Image: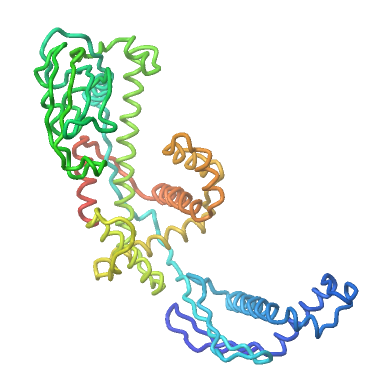
Amino acid sequence: MQVTESKSDGLIRVYDITIPGETLESKVTSKLMEARGTVELKGFRKGKVPLKLLRQRFGQSLLGESIQELVDGTVRDLVAEKEHRPAMTPDIKMTNEDFNEGDDISLTVAYELLPDVPPVDFSGIELEKMVVKVEESAVDEALGRLAADAVNYETAKKAAEDKDQVVIDFLGKMDGEPFDGGAAEDFPLVLGSNQFVPGFEEQLVGVKAGDEKTVELTMPEEYGNAELAGKAVTFDVTVKEVKAPQAAELDDEFAKRFGMESLDSLKDDIRARVGGEFEQASRAHLKRKLLDDLDERVDFELPPTMLEIEGKQVAHQLWHDENPDVEGHDHPEVEPTEDHLKIARRRVMLGLLLAHVGSENDISVTEDELRDVMIQQARQYPGQERQFIEWVQGNQQAINEMQAPIFEDKVVDLILGQAKITEKTVTKDELEKALEDLETESV
């Protein structure tokens, strides 16, 4: 076998390789000999089929299989011999397109190397962590939201107002004829909830129990039923009951509705959850500031193809962010701009840096950590959790996508553990404003 390096430019390597025809012939013959012991053909005993006949029957398929194995093995040996770390799968091309059996195999193998990541003294990084104390006002606010969601409705002898609940029978008609799906009995409707099509609830403000009212409106143009979309319809409504909202009593009985023994224990639980939310937001801000610092601190050559691919992904992603109404990918290709490539460069460089640090420190994602995330995501599909988990377990790409953020966070924690972190107490609004500012900077 002959190997010639035809290009060595930065991280790019290109090799011209020739595999002798004799090597290929030997490979094919070896496979024919292996098959000979198992193949049965009419008129011949097992293991006694002539090689010439086997070659006529199976030669072409074994030739293709042998070429693939020789090429894969040759490239694998080349990379191992050179002690290279390709950034992506090598690009392999046969250069003798008019190949005939017995000819040498001529190849061009091109790949880009993963760069050497320079060492970074993380102890020289100085960051400020924003800390938000959980004030009682935040606990009271969260408690108020729970109370609002747990509101009771009690019968009231009065005209219905916004926020009241009316219990109604209704029958929808178009051109005087009832239409499918337009009727219900004893339906509890909270006025102002926007549960029904625009204009329906507003016309029920002022009704009383026992009233009969005809609601007239035009169905929305985007209504799901095409036969009704944009059409004038009426609803014959009978009001059976008007109920007024009654705020929940914030006491121990209220707390038991949420699985707590007392109102104090409910407040403690809320305080812990609110504190957890503040901590998550604070860490997100700290992580972003760390990545900003690393982006300025580290610089090394990047694989061109990896950068190009990431640039296209950034351009595609931002295009969809700007065009949310476009679903799928049936649109013209989005060419990356300098801004897109700048974002891509940051992502690739930080990704390679974090991967290097993780590898150097033997960081990995445990089965328990992966399982916890898998279960958490499965909860987004009620009733289909088992199917989701089975799908993930059989999909390596999905597993990789779940592992990536876990791995990244563990590496970030390692770096933060070596950096100098000072704490600054701020308000909730100040933390939210700081996060918004960072998001604005990244666009």
Residue occupying the point 40% across, 17% down: 259
Q: Quadrant of residue 249?
A: top left
Q: Which quarter of the rendered picture does the C terminus lie within?
A: bottom left
Residue occupying the point 85% across, 72% down: 37
The answer to whether residue 43 is left or right of residue 253 is right
| Front position in the image: 433 or 166 | 166
Work out whether 174 lies above or below 268: below
Work out whether 56 lies above or below 308: below
Colour mode of the rendering: rainbow
Work out whether 354 lies above or below 31: above
The answer to whether residue 232 is left or right of residue 147 is left
Residue occupying the point 56% across, 86% down: 107
Which residue is outermost to the left?
206
Label total for image: 0
Q: Quadrant of residue 2?
A: bottom right
Residue occupying the point 20% across, 9% down: 155
Q: Which quarter of the rendered picture does the N terminus lie within?
A: bottom right
- Residue 425, image x, y percentages: 24, 36
| Front position in the image: 368 or 149 | 149
- Residue 397, image x, y percentages: 49, 56
Work out whether 243 lies above or below 432: above
- Residue 118, image x, y percentages: 42, 67
The answer to whether residue 282 is left or right of residue 355 is left
| Front position in the image: 212 or 60 | 212
The answer to whether residue 222 is left or right of residue 80 is left
- Residue 138, image x, y percentages: 23, 26
